[in-house]
Image (tube, rainbow, N blue to C red):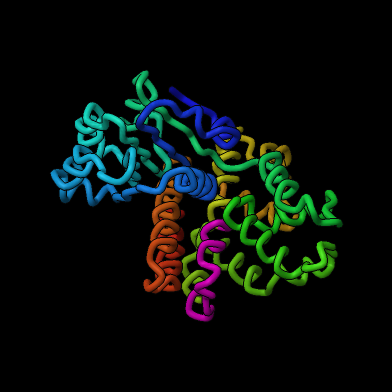
Amino acid sequence: MIFKSFQIENDISILKKRITLFYGENTGLIDDFKKLLKGKNNNILSFSESDLLSNKELFINEVLNDSLFEAKKIFFVQNATDKSLKIIQEVIPKLDTNEMYLFAGILEKKSKLRKYFEVENNLNIVPCYQDNEISLKKIILSSLKDYSGTDMQLINFLIENSSNSRSKLKNEIIKIKSYFADNVIKIDALKELLNSKEDASFDLIKDSALSGNKEKTNQLLNSTVFDTDRSVFYIATINQRLLKLKEILKKDFVNIEKSISEIKPPIFWKDKATFMFQARKWNTKKINNILNKTYNLELIFKSNSLISKDILIKKLLLDICENANS
């Protein structure tokens, strides 16, 4: 059964089937669903798809073995793709009282895993598409309901500053709650708190890579020091531009200028020329390829604090530049 993500946000208990697939580009929303599930269950066993593929028998044995201490076991399968479908099909009849939740990145319509969950009546599937202004506004109003100064100017600033990323927005809200201890938000102080010169520098590198400008991208990469604590924000910034480009290409590829003028929220006038140039460099297939890379890279950043995030961000930008010219 296919559910809208907002239905599950309102009441996750409506997922009556024992196995559910969450998929899509909105990693922040998927993370929220994981937190909801963890809050309701203590006995969670987490596997990556590579665990399933490398040690299928161990996974199946875990599914078959009932817990002596808990009423049921909850299985998380991270980074699911079509490769794990046969194993999932094998364990579904053996779940009994246990439950399983699969988490995947972008799955195209032709994906076997996605198709299987969409047509089988005994399964749940929840697409997690990118947030829009309405959903982000709800998060802001709910999180800052006890704060004064939460007007439309502040809301629009937060949405724009977070690059339409739920994860980035929630990080910004944490900063606000820590900084404005008197529960009074002042917009000038907020802008000073959240804005930085690093953002502008990264925008230059991002735009150079998305435009396929190899010389400028390499030059900027060699002269820029990345803040590893902001790695997820860098990914969110890249994703926002890719999703905007994807939206434009879906509207009208022939008349890109017209499509850009109609998009909401509007493209800032200084960015229009760059945005139009990038739109002519990219297509949906190339965009989805990079979105899958950013999704997997974000998962790596969140699960491994010891890796060299700056090196991986630089590699991602070089991959983007190469894809722009392919």
Residue at coordinates 46% horizontally, 29% vertically from top-left?
A: 15
Direction left: furthest residue? 57
Q: Is residue 46 magenta?
A: no
Q: Nearer the viewer, residue 156 or 123?
A: 123
Direction front: furthest residue? 69
Q: Nearer the viewer, residue 83 or 318?
A: 83
Residue 285: percent from left, percent from top: 42, 41
Residue 186: percent from left, percent from top: 85, 64
Residue 286: percent from left, percent from top: 43, 46
Q: How many marks?
A: 0
Q: Nearer the viewer, residue 296 or 282?
A: 296
Residue at coordinates 70% horizontally, 39% vertically from top-left?
A: 134
Q: Which residues are magenta?
A: 220-237
Residue at coordinates 68% horizontally, 74% vertically from top-left?
A: 197
Q: Nearer the viewer, residue 266 or 114?
A: 114
Name the dominant secondary structure of the magenta segment.
Answer: helix
User: Quick check: 70 left or right of 135?
Assistant: left
Residue at coordinates 41% horizontally, 70% vertically from top-left?
A: 305
User: Quick check: 45 left or right of 240?
Assistant: left
Residue 183: percent from left, percent from top: 81, 62
Q: Is residue 215 above or below residue 254?
A: below
Which quarter of the figure is the N terminus placed in? top left
Q: Is residue 215 above or below residue 259?
A: below
Q: Is residue 228 magenta?
A: yes
Visible residue check, residue 178 = yes
Visible residue check, residue 25 = no
